[in-house]
Every structure is written in C-alpha cells, then in structure tokens.
Amino acid sequence: MHIFDWHYQGSYFTTKERRHIDALWDAAENSADNEEQHNNIRRSRLSWRFQKANQMLDEFSYINPFKHRDENEKLYNDIVELGITRLTEGKPLTQTPNFWLRPLEWKE
C-alpha cells in the first residue's frame, strides 16, 4: 500500500477537491465494462481511501467516531477482498486490526 509511514507528509486537498476526486473515482467505477476492470479500479482507489483514512478525513473523520470505525472496517475488508497482503515492504497486514486506529497501524 505504501513505502513510507509519513502519512502527514502526503498531499493535502481541500474538501471541495476531495469531493471532486471521489466523484472521479465513482465515475471510473461506474464506467467499468466488466468485473475485472471494476476490481482493478477498486484496487487502485484503495490508495486514495488509505490516504484519507490515515489523515482522518471525510468518511474517516472522528467527528462521528462510529462511522470512522465502520469506514475503517470497510476499507480493511476491501483490502483483504482485493488481495492486498502487505501494507509496507516489511510489514504484512494484520489479521486482527483495531479499527479505531489509523490503517497505518494495521501491521503485524
């Protein structure tokens, strides 16, 4: 999913920009012609969701802590479903994540 643990050094987007980016991802998913294309788009979108989750933005915000937890669980389930097994080069994805934590913490 990433090489560096420095989530805070990532790109910063305004709320309006993030909504636009989400709409572009939605359009890409909706334009998939088959399941393979759809899963490839979903797999690519994981990096965007992972970034937002680590920065606790939008659906991953702590403003609504239970939604934050639920969205983290959805992200984790998608990561597993789409075949991702490592979060970094040296750390495998845990099988027992704490969904209250940022995804960066979901390492063995």
Image (cartoon, rainbow, N blue to C red):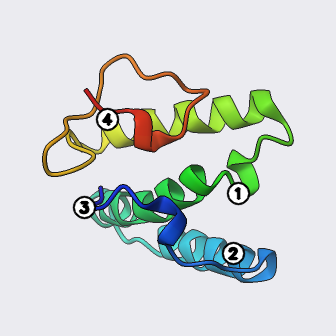
Q: Disc 4 vs disc 1: Cβ atoms closer than 8 Å?
A: no
Counting labels gives 4
The amino acid pointed to by label 4 is Val
Q: Disc 1 vs disc 2: Cβ atoms closer than 8 Å?
A: yes
Q: Is residue 56 above or below residue 78?
A: below
The amino acid pointed to by label 1 is Leu
Of helix, strand and loop, which one carries label 4? helix
> For the view shown, which residue lies furthest in the top direction?
96
* Quadrant occupied by the N terminus: bottom left
Packing grade of label 4 (10 A; few <14, some 14-19, many >=20) is some
Residue 37 relative to residue 45: left or right: left
Of helix, strand and loop, which one carries label 2? helix
Residue 38 placement (x, y as % from top left): 38, 62
The span from disc 3 to disc 4 (Cα, nearest Å) is 18 Å
Residue underneath mark 3: 3
Packing grade of label 2 (10 A; few <14, some 14-19, many >=20) is some
Q: Disc 1 vs disc 3: Cβ atoms closer than 8 Å?
A: no
Residue 99 placement (x, y as % from top left): 55, 26
Of helix, strand and loop, which one carries label 1? loop
Residue underneath mark 1: 57
The span from disc 1 to disc 3 (Cα, nearest Å) is 21 Å
The span from disc 4 to disc 2 (Cα, nearest Å) is 24 Å
